[in-house]
Amino acid sequence: MGLLDPRRQNGCAAHSLVFAAPGALALAALVAVAGDARADTAAGASGVEIEWIAPGECADRARVLAEIEQRLGRPSEANGEPPLKARAVVSRNGRGSWDLRLTTTLGETTWSRELHGETCAELADAAALIIALALDPDATGRGVPNAEADVGAGAGAGADPAAGTDPAAGADPAAGADPAVDAAPDAPTAAEVAPAASPPAGASAPSAPARPSRPLELRGTLRASGVLDTASLPAVAPGAGISAGVLIGAFRAELSGTYFGAQQAFVGRTTMGGDVRLVTGGLRLCYAMRYRAFELGPCAGIEVGVMSAASFGAASPGSNRALWVAPHPGALATFALSDRLRVPLTIDVPFPVTRDRFVLVGIGAVHRSAAATLRASLGVEVRFP
């Protein structure tokens, strides 16, 4: 995701902030996150005006301004420069990372971008670096010993590698004047840019850096659900289910248990029949792809259980049971209420391997399951940690 994207510029000052990586970085790092947001607006370091709308757990505007001043190496009074205006709206998304809607204006030129980051702290630090560089390309490492580490951790991936982390490149006035580096390609997050050397003079912008691999996320899940089965029992049967599982990136493995209460089945038009129940335990594997607050993907599993029947109305009451084994393809969809709480919906189609027939001896058949049944569940899922 490019941070210095000319597609959203207004007016004719298209290169007012063109200093390659510093300008791109300036739009990448104002990402902050979920909770009850606060809004701070005021003129700050060296004529900067920041409207910072962020949760209480994130850094506030004063901290960002103080970091800007440290990097600029001068106090916050105005110095005759055109005022840089920035507006950042920060929130936490359903995946536990952070989203930012950032708009910056310098003179008649405006940039607007949506950015993403892993933590609020790294993005607040990167915001300070970025805005400082927007005001002074020579501020790359001033006042901060580990400037390169800061850029790598929090800078926007749309930054041009030409001027981002090398102090020598930042000191070259021509580093921000080449239009060829203004349209640095987009990249997805604010924490995925590695420092790179400056290209030769007059060279076009390099391609976006390859996305580094991330460690797989490992989490546990607990879920309670209401279940509805259409054809395993004599009638449409409500039930209850619980499950526990593990998430490894987009993969899910879970163990579940489901109980369906007694459903009555009659022999013909008589008053005799049986109460039929089903109890199962199963294993399900899913691959759920994420899109914003949603997860959606295919599943496959198998369940093993017991179907039992107890007669009623007969002169000699009795009961019996049979093994239930059913593989089932299916699908899973979830919606995030928060980072830890989700609403899951599952659809499965069990195919019983054996379909035993329950009968009242000398009277007639009571029940036999269908060859396939449709089963749906809706519940609440808690994820940890």
Image (cartoon, rainbow, N blue to C red):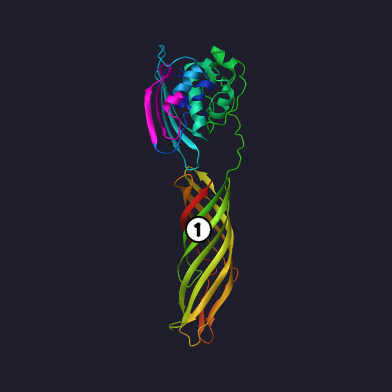
Q: Does 46 appear in magenta?
A: yes
Rendered residue at 48%/57% (across/down) = 224
Q: Position of residue 223 (x, y in %)?
A: 50, 55
Q: Position of residue 178 (x, y in %)?
A: 53, 16
Count of marks, rendered view: 1
As drawn, is 307 to the left or to the right of 109?
A: right
Rendered residue at 50%/78% (across/down) = 310
Q: Does 285 appear in magenta?
A: no
Q: Is residue 280 visible?
A: yes
Q: Residues within 10 Å of mark 1 (few under 14, many from 20)?
A: many
Quarter occupied by residue 324 = bottom right
Quarter occupied by residue 254 = bottom right
Q: SS for tag 1?
A: strand
Quarter occupied by residue 103 = top left
Q: Position of residue 336 (x, y in %)?
A: 46, 47
Instruction: Look at the image and give the residue range highlighted in magenta.
Output: 37-64
Q: Is residue 267 visible?
A: no
Q: Is residue 367 above or below residue 177?
A: below
Q: Which residue is mark 1?
A: 347
Which residue occupies the foreground of this view, 47 or 326? Answer: 47
Q: Position of residue 371 (x, y in %)?
A: 55, 69
Rendered residue at 48%/85% (across/down) = 314
Q: Which three-letter amino acid code belongs to the residue tagged 1?
A: Ile
